[in-house]
Amino acid sequence: MQNGSVIKRRDLLALIGTIAGSSAMYHAMTSLGFASESAYKGPLKLAGDVKGTSVLILGAGLAGMTAALELRKAGYKVQILEFNSRAGGRNWTIRGGDSFVELGGFKQTCEFEQGLYINPGPWRIPYHHRALLDYCRRLNVALEPFIQLNHNAYLHATRAFNGTPQRIRSIKADFQGQVSELLAKVTQQGKLDEAVTKEDQEILLQSLRAWGALDRDYKYSANLVSAEFRGYARDPGGGLTADPLPSEPIALSEILRSRLWRYLQAFARYNFQTTMFQPVGGMDMIGKAFAREVGDLIRHNAKVTQIQQNSSGVTVSYVDAAKPSVVQQATADWCICTIPLSILSQLPVDVSAPMKNAIDALPYAGSVKIGLQFKRRFWEEDEAIYGGISFTDLPIRQIAYPNYGFNRAGRGILLGAYLFEGANSYEFTAMTPAERVASAVEFGSKIHPQYKTEFETGVAVAWHRVPFTLGCSGEWTDAGRAQHYRTLCQIDGRIVLAGEHASDLPAWQEGAILSALDAIVRLHERVVRT
Amino acid sequence: MIRVRTSAVAALTLLSATAATGQDSTASRRTFSSGYRFVEMTGEELFANVCQGCHMPDASGATGAGNYPSLAANKNLESGSYPIFMVINGRRGMPAFGDMMTDGQVAAVVNYLRTHFGNNFEDAVTAKDVQEARR
């Protein structure tokens, strides 16, 4: 870019600020992608007379319970029908003693030690998921850090480095260092003269040396400068063993060919940037906190079989799991339906043809999570890995270390596989739970050989086999979203949908909550207007 | 593409006290694809590693809050074009596999389905049928 030929964004903003005032500048900043903020604008204030209006909510997941909490507060008569005997939906934690049966009848009973758990569904909360964080604060859900990036966890490629896992720290430092060295070299050769002024080139060289851990000659090599980034062959110590020894960088070509660089984006993307959170004690602390507020409104074990509406209200038929032959009915003025579309698409539902078409169009992603209990926390004791995630090209894709109970003796739980979409998620779903666990142990032992002696017991959740969702989350394509999304979110007569599938944050809890808030604001406007 | 195979029988011997139970009613060998697309080539392999996840090893489907339809003795399979459409495009929660399988793979799994589990439709579909259905 030539100097002066283009107005830089920052200069443009300063100009707008001077001429039009800060409000205009704020809007300009937003449209230019700065100051981007959550769609959440703080706790809802639903003002106006709701005139005794009743709302029937289908599903006691986060979307349904958010709607129930806010609508009751605004004066509505609220009732929730829930398929499970438990509130929370996909907000779910499995602990020792818990049993669950997946489709096909395969039953698992978790044998984890008391206090250990696995979150088979959502497991992390980005700092910018403001609505979810606000509900956690209002409902007294204690949070702790979820460690997305642990520099001492591994990157692993089956066909690189003889299958030896590499520390994230080393790959990141060596990649960054050698790219910096290359850029410094072409800068010094004058090859950037047209793109960068002489003055800026000097600053660029300084920054590359600092950022890339280059030596005085702009080289990235085995010395105590690079060791401060990639780690030491011998760490600094005390007394007579104080001298640190530098470690040997991995050649750029090897890193490039290993493809390990592709995992570095897992830490760079907006959804995965620090700080991330998890509830203390398990993700279901959120669902339980909501249930403390609205649990009295929930009719559990209710399987919805039909949704009817006319100009004056909705009638929902359902059966109790214990008495499936007796059809019962619930009625209300309005219905907020959070039933996953994988299920809703199979029900007789009185909605417009475009809405029905939208409901039928969304496929549900496959996802599998496998929790493994080990006799000891060898990843901490032997390998100094405290929390975080290792990535691999093996079919298990990830191994995630617990972000709680650090540095304790005794047992621990690993997330031994996390599949999301792609062929492997289907292949793992097609197995029995025992096969999934066995495969996770076999593959994981290639990264942590301790698996073979330390493994005790495991549980495996394949979301396509989960009876209450028949899939993990709505799998929108750009084309599908363009065609159906706005229709799906419309109030159709007296029915409006909510849930992660009715959001632009698919598979995130924030999406479920924001969709519920958006739906009830629109519904409330209609109620108070008429 | 590489394919990783593991013997589930051998793998199961690693399980000292797993909580997971359930009978291994299908192939004793599992196949793992290396990328986004499936490496399984035969209809039998594709069914055992993909379809049975939802439709179950005996193709009888399953029922929870919603249903996975039974594919056994299923009259909807009479015309080969219907299962081809469903595998490629998905519908009502069923994922679209069009991007994850070649024409030949889609044809193979449809033909397997239409000649097993109490289905006896002998008019095999071809990769060309699948190619045309993609348009």
Image (cartoon, coloured by chain):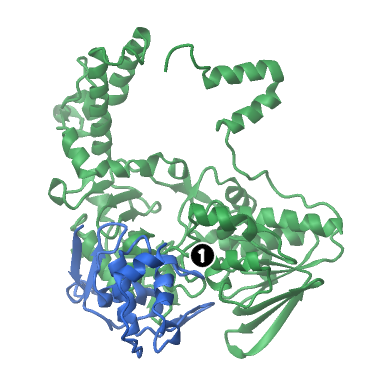
Chain colours: A green, B blue
Q: Nearer the viewer, residue A203 or A279?
A: A203
Q: Nearer the viewer, residue A340 or A487?
A: A487
- Whether residue A234 is visible here, answered yes or no, is no
Where does the C terminus of chain A fall, quadrant-wise? bottom right
Left/right placement of residue B64 relative to residue A241 reads right
Residue drawn at x 14%, y 46% as measured from the top left: A161
Left/right placement of residue A463 relative to residue A49 reads left
| Mark 1: secondary structure | loop
- Whether residue B126 is visible here, answered yes or no, is yes
Rendered location of residue A97, percent (x, y): 42, 74
Residue furthest to the top in view is: A199
Residue drawn at x 38%, y 66% as measured from the top left: B132
Left/right placement of residue A309 relative to residue B133 reads right
Rendered location of residue A163, percent (x, y): 16, 51
Where does the N terminus of chain A fall, quadrant-wise? top left
Is A157 placed above or below A469 here? above
Label 1, residues with CA under 10 Å away: few <14, some 14-19, many ≥20: many
Is A311 placed above or below A522 here? below
Q: Which residue is mark 1?
A: A90
Rendered location of residue A433, percent (x, y): 33, 74
Left/right placement of residue A357 relative to residue A406 reads right
Quadrant of the rendered image containing residue A55: bottom right
Residue drawn at x 72%, y 50% as measured from the top left: A44
Rendered location of residue B134, percent (x, y): 40, 63
Quadrant of the rendered image containing residue A296: bottom right
Is B92 placed above or below A392 here? below
Label 1 resides on the chain identified as: A
* Amino acid carrying mark 1 in the image: Arg
